[in-house]
Image: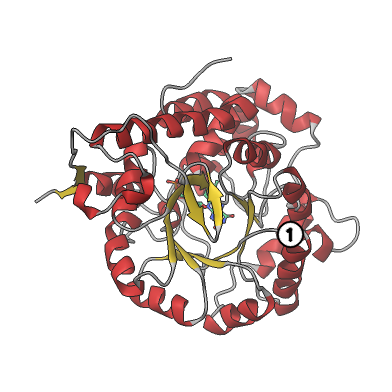
């Protein structure tokens, strides 16, 4: 089995495994894809200022989120349709999260049902949902998450409209999906992927939505129905209030970038925020989450748990985010690339690599305890 040295390696490995149409679906952003570059570059606005001659012979990188202790301050962002890149990917990601004792945010657009993912990793699975245009379905998803005993519910709010992802349009990855000669050639160039795709019955089912479709609906028909329910641009703070009323556990909002929305989140009784721009897949000209984190932390103080994703690739990124107020960071694309390239072993490697990098940086900067990181360890580029 091949090993990656760092998270970037998984991207190159996945590119060799996946047809272009699938690779681009993961890799792409919106419009000119400038936001993706900004998400990475923004981390280099900060440097870490080491302190020496502290005893760092033991280190602790655990973090506590909503009263539960996780072994590392990292986790898996929700990503829909993971089963398209590797059959059973959602289950592999859940198992990797369990093994590493970190959160796995199961997307509502996943190919595993909430109920099944929660069985694999009962202490690690969080459930992410988009509000739909159907109030009864929203409430039913909350009920199902509760009955599956999911620990944390996450509402993603940064998709009021399907964004302009030009790679998908050029490749023909649009709905309704139509097989063309060029897509056929593309998939034939990756026979390993094609074989498992065909053996598993083709397009994977968005299983969480099957109960809301007519009986016997196939994967395409379920996806079409999902497309009529989301995006739901009428979603508002009232929707959040309705979900808050139904969900007693920790409730997190994902996709907030404006400090005023962070304040609103606190006032609407939310417990946490994932500061995120959806990996620059929605609004290309949105600021990077790391650049907005200080203002959001200042706006909400200690009232809320802050987490962050979008462009996180290194242990040092996670450390920088903690110095600016985020208790944990998540990643989307890297775990998909890893599982697409190497299956279960790839998903496991992601956490081994990140654990090692976080530990090395903590040692190098003279801070033995992740929880003790503050702005004092940061140097801002001038
Ligand atoms: C996503 N993302 C996402 N977010 C969400 O809240 N629900 C979802 O269903 C999805 N689906 C999805 C699919 C794919 C293929 C990707 C790449 C991303 C966004 C994701 O949760 C996360 O915010 C970003 O991926 C983080 O940025 P990086 O780590 O990919 O740079």
Q: Is residue 215 left or right of residue 58?
A: right
Q: Nearer the viewer, residue 83 or 46?
A: 46
Q: Residue at x 68, y 68 (%)?
A: 228
**Quadrant containing the N terminus in the rendered view:** top right
Farthest-out residue, bottom: 238
Q: Residue at x 57, y 85 (%)?
A: 238
Farthest-out residue, right: 215
Farthest-out residue, front: 55
As helix, strand or loop, the secondary structure at mark 1 comes to loop
Are there few (<14), some (14-19), or many (20+) residues within 10 Å of tag 1?
A: some
Q: Is residue 331 above or below residue 287?
A: above
Q: Quadrant of residue 151?
A: bottom right
Q: Is residue 103 above or below residue 291?
A: above
Q: Nearer the viewer, residue 48 or 130?
A: 48
Q: Position of residue 340 (x, y in %)?
A: 59, 31
Under 8 Å from ligand 1: the CB of mark 1?
Answer: no
Q: Is residue 369 visible?
A: yes
Q: Position of residue 231 (x, y in %)?
A: 59, 68
Q: What residue sits right under mark 1 in the picture?
A: 149
Q: Position of residue 223 (x, y in %)?
A: 72, 56
Q: Quadrant of residue 179?
A: top right
């Amino acid at each position: 089995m091949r090993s990656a040295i760092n998270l970037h390696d998984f991207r190159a490995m996945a590119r060799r495994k996946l047809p272009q149409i699938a690779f681009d679906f993961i890799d792409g952003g919106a419009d000119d894809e400038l936001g993706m570059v900004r998400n990475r570059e923004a981390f280099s606005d900060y440097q870490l200022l080491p302190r020496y001659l502290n005893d760092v012979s033991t280190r602790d990188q655990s973090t506590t989120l909503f009263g539960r202790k996780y072994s590392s301050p990292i986790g898996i962002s929700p990503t829909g349709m993971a089963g398209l890149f590797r059959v059973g990917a959602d289950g592999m990601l859940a198992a990797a999260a369990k093994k590493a004792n970190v959160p796995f945010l199961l997307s509502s657009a996943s190919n595993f049902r909430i109920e099944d993912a929660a069985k694999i990793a009962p202490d690690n699975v969080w459930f992410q949902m988009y509000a739909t245009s159907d109030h009864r379905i929203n409430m039913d998803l909350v009920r199902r998450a509760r009955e599956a005993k999911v620990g944390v519910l996450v509402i993603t709010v940064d998709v009021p409209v399907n964004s302009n992802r030009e790679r998908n349009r050029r490749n023909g990855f649009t709905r309704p999906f139509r097989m063309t000669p060029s897509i056929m050639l593309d998939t034939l160039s990756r026979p390993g992927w094609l074989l498992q795709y065909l053996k598993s019955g083709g397009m994977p089912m968005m299983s969480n939505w099957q109960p809301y479709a007519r009986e016997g609906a196939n994967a395409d028909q379920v996806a079409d129905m999902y497309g009529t329910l989301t995006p739901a641009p009428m979603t508002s703070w009232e929707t959040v209030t309705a979900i808050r009323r139904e969900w007693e556990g920790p409730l997190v909002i994902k996709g907030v970038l404006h400090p005023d929305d962070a304040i609103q989140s606190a006032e609407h009784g939310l417990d946490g925020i994932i500061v995120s721009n959806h990996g620059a897949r929605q609004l290309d000209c949105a600021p990077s989450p790391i650049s907005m984190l200080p203002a959001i932390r200042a706006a909400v103080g200690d009232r809320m748990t802050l987490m962050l994703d979008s462009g996180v690739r290194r242990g040092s990124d996670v450390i920088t985010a903690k110095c600016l107020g985020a208790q944990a960071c998540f990643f989307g694309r890297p775990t998909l690339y890893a599982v697409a390239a190497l299956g279960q072993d790839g998903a496991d490697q992601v956490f081994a690599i990140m654990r090692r990098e976080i530990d090395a940086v903590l040692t190098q900067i003279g801070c033995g305890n992740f929880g003790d990181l503050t702005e004092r360890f940061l140097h801002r580029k001038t």
